[in-house]
């Protein structure tokens, strides 16, 4: 009751309350609290996921995407951290980016997929990682990179594909950065070979990087496989 000689009591309006009897005024709702109805004897704390920024409020406000609030009676929301996101209104927590995704910024409502040639192995990541040499990744949103296969190589970082060894080269091992030259006495005839082939008896090859072997000339012979030279026929013999 705000005046003397009153015949009735005054009612506190929305946004104010009074929890004591015999008072001459109402109490304005504090920041972080609100009073939605008339004649209230208490103020209501903002619930998790919501906030009340001004005194005298009649309602709470949900946190926007990119922000959250885990506590009661708060006057503002918390901005999502790098490596996390908040996708919905009224959230009481932030969500960590899953492996294969990342988020470098504050206040985000989603995470980025790792780009082809990159990967993200952990939760809550703030950046993607390029695939090392010898590895590749053709897809987005991946947790790891792929090893180059035998017969292939990857010479640079952040590669989206492996490269087949050319004829004359081979590679027997995975996750390699180069191919090996076919050695003398051997050859590699096709792409993507994981091994070299020795020249058969009757053929030879003196050079590196060969794609075929050489037939022994007239008057010469090659007795063993993998030979780098032909041998003249001894006196009294011929070929």
Image: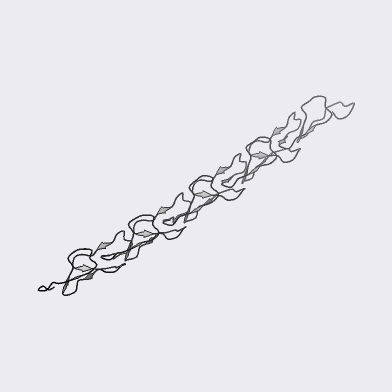
Image quadrant assignment for residue 223: bottom left
Percent coordinates x, y for residue 218 in the rendering: 17, 75
Question: Relative to 218, is 26 on the left or the right?
Answer: right
Q: How many marks?
A: 0
Percent coordinates x, y for residue 219 in the rendering: 16, 74
Percent coordinates x, y for residue 238 in the rendering: 12, 73
Q: Is residue 226 above or below residue 83?
A: below
Question: Relative to 35, is 217 on the left or the right?
Answer: left
Q: Residue at x 41, y 53 (%)?
A: 146
Q: Residue furthest front?
A: 235
Q: Nearer the viewer, residue 86 or 216?
A: 216
Q: Residue at x 58, y 42 (%)?
A: 94
Image quadrant assignment for residue 58: top right
Q: Residue furthest top?
A: 21
In which quadrant is the N terminus drawn? Answer: top right
Q: Residue furthest left?
A: 236
Image quadrant assignment for residue 192: bottom left
Percent coordinates x, y for residue 207 in the rendering: 29, 69
Q: Nearer the viewer, residue 1 or 232?
A: 232
Q: Residue furthest bottom?
A: 218
């Amino acid at each position: 009751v705000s005046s003397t000689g009153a015949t009735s009591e005054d009612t506190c309006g929305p946004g104010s309350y009074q929890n004591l009897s015999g008072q001459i005024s109402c109490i304005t709702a504090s920041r972080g609290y609100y009073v939605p109805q008339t004649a209230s004897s208490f103020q209501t704390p903002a619930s998790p996921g919501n906030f009340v920024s001004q005194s005298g409020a009649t309602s709470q406000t949900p946190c926007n995407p990119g922000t959250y609030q885990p506590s009661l009676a708060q006057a503002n929301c918390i901005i999502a951290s790098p490596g996390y996101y908040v996708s919905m209104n009224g959230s009481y927590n932030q969500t960590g980016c899953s492996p294969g995704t990342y988020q470098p910024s504050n206040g985000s409502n989603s995470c980025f997929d790792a780009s082809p040639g990159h990967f993200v192995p952990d939760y809550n990541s703030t950046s993607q990682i390029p695939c090392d040499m010898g590895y590749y990744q053709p897809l987005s949103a991946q947790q790891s990179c792929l090893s180059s296969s035998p017969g292939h190589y990857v010479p640079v970082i952040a590669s989206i594909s492996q490269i087949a060894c050319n004829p004359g080269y081979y590679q027997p091992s995975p996750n390699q950065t180069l191919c090996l030259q076919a050695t003398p006495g051997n050859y590699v005839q096709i792409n993507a070979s994981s091994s070299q082939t020795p020249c058969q008896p009757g053929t030879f090859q003196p050079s590196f990087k060969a794609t075929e072997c050489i037939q022994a000339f007239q008057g010469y012979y090659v007795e063993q496989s993998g030979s780098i030279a032909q041998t003249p026929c001894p006196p009294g013999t011929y070929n």
